[in-house]
């Protein structure tokens, strides 16, 4: 028999993710530090949740979301200079900044060259030679019977960024930290060079990324399953709701919750899940799933302490988009539902508020231009600009 869980029953039955407290402690420090510096804090949720079918998980249900909306939105919030961002994202989905070098659309290694010889000169100058450029491909001599040597491990960056106390003033106009030294190969006469046409955009991106790190404006937390997502959503919302500044004033209305994650509607409760890999050979597989409780109402009433809540509504049938969005707004009592359709979500969305609806559109081909190396117009830029204006009004005490 399928069951209907309340949010409380769900949390009583589903075990918390392993590093929950560690993440929440880090969020607490992050929110306090940014609040002290006069910034607002936005929680951006991004990517799709999974539903595992087994405890020792081999199979799971997933959805289409790559986290494009969330990663892009996080960047635009940061760019505004007014928000610190908690980025709650599906593990391995797109991330702010690094998304521009996604392995499928813009492979990072294709932007680089190996330069042999005198690398103080550009490869075009005498003494330097760009490997693999302008020459017919040659088969290198085999090394121990292999085409190339084993790939050495990369050095991971430290897990937590250094502590910082840089003031907000002129966030995006502040001088960037000095660039890291150029990467060098094992041999002294080999270097890695960014192809000249990629240098300017990469430098600009790298500077923005380093600045955000330096100022401590971005805290990323991964989830995989719907259960992990909901535990983290509850924990982070409570921390944001309860944190106070030095004058004892809560983040309250200055907090924003931007819920762009694609959250599973059905799941298999922990107690009903198969321990081991489900075996084949017994004919068809029939799975019964229970409904995931909707947590938005509890978030509004109990967790977020009057924070500004923006939920997303995804549909494929245009005729039900606005009625469903309006229904969510009435049922949960939050501030805005941003409606989008699967096929057109990259170039049009509708803001549904109590006082009416408003479409936001960009030219349909604008989002495709990036793959051709042109300047990209992202709809998230306009979404965030509009939301910041509405949030300003909300913070001042006006309705939305
Ligand atoms: O990642 P992209 O490819 O860029 O795609 C972006 C997107 C289409 C996923 C995004 O724009 C979007 O629409 N996200 C919300 C999709 C969704 O899960 O809709 P929903 O109807 O299931 O949920 C509506 C809202 O309720 C969501 O904000 C969700 O966070 C919230 N919810 C959902 C389930 C649940 N148990 N509790 C919730 O509070």
Image (cartoon, rainbow, N blue to C red):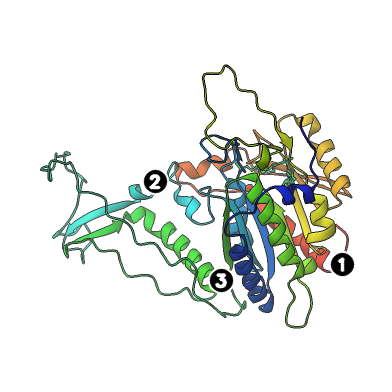
Position in image of residue 68 (x %, y %): 58, 46
Quadrant of residue 231 within the rendered picture: bottom right
Q: Which residue is mark 1?
A: 397
Q: Which residue is mark 2?
A: 107
Front residue of this view, candidates 54 and 96: 54
Kind of element beneath mark 2: loop
In the rendered image, the quadrant that contains the N terminus is: top right
Q: Is residue 63 left or right of residue 191?
A: right
Front residue of this view, candidates 229 and 55: 55
The residues tagged by marks 1 and 3 sit, at their Cα atoms, a distance apart of: 28 Å
Task: Tell me if residue 347 comes above or below residue 27 in the rendering.
Answer: above
At 68% across and 43% down in the image, what residue appears? Answer: 263
Point out the quarter of the image occupied by ligand 1: top right
Front residue of this view, candidates 398 and 242: 242
Q: Which residue is mark 3?
A: 216
- Mark earlier in primary sequence (1, 2): 2
The residues tagged by marks 1 and 2 sit, at their Cα atoms, a distance apart of: 46 Å
Kind of element beneath mark 3: loop
Quadrant of residue 345 within the rendered picture: top right
Observer-side mark, 1 or 3, equals: 3
In the rendered image, the quadrant that contains the C terminus is: bottom right
């Amino acid at each position: 028999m399928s069951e209907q869980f309340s949010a409380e029953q769900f949390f009583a039955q589903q075990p918390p993710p392993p590093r929950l407290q560690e993440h929440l402690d880090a969020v607490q420090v992050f929110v306090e530090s940014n609040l002290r510096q006069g910034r607002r804090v936005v929680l951006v949720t991004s990517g799709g949740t999974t539903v595992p079918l087994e405890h020792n998980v081999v199979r799971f249900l997933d959805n289409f979301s790559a986290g494009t909306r969330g990663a892009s939105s996080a960047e635009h919030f940061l760019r505004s200079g007014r928000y610190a961002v908690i980025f709650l994202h599906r593990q391995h989905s797109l991330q702010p900044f690094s998304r521009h070098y996604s392995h499928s659309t813009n492979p990072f290694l294709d932007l680089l060259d190996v330069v042999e010889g005198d690398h103080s000169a550009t490869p075009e100058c005498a003494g330097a030679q760009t490997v693999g450029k302008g020459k017919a491909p040659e088969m290198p001599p085999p090394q121990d019977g292999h085409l190339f040597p084993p790939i050495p491990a990369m050095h991971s960056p430290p897990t937590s960024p250094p502590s910082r106390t840089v003031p907000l003033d002129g966030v995006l106009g502040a001088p960037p930290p000095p660039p890291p030294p150029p990467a060098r190969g094992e041999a002294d006469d080999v270097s890695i060079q960014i192809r000249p046409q990629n240098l300017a955009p990469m430098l600009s991106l790298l500077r923005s990324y380093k600045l955000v790190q330096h100022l401590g404006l971005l805290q990323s937390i991964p989830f995989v399953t719907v259960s992990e997502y909901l535990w983290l959503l509850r924990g982070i919302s409570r921390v944001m709701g309860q944190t106070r500044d030095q004058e004892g004033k809560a983040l309250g209305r200055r907090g924003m919750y931007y819920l762009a994650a694609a959250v599973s509607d059905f799941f298999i409760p922990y107690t009903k899940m198969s321990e081991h890999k489900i075996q084949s050979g017994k004919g068809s597989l029939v799975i019964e799933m229970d409904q995931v409780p909707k947590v938005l109402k509890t978030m509004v009433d109990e967790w977020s302490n009057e924070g500004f809540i923006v939920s997303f509504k995804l549909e494929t049938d245009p005729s039900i988009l606005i009625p469903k969005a309006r229904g969510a707004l009435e049922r949960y009592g939050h501030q805005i539902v941003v409606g989008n359709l699967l096929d057109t979500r990259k170039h049009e969305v509708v803001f549904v508020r109590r006082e009416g609806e408003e479409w936001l559109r960009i030219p349909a081909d604008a989002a495709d231009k990036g793959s051709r190396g042109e300047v990209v117009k992202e709809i998230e830029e306009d979404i965030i600009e509009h939301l910041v204006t509405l949030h300003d009004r909300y913070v001042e005490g006006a309705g939305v």
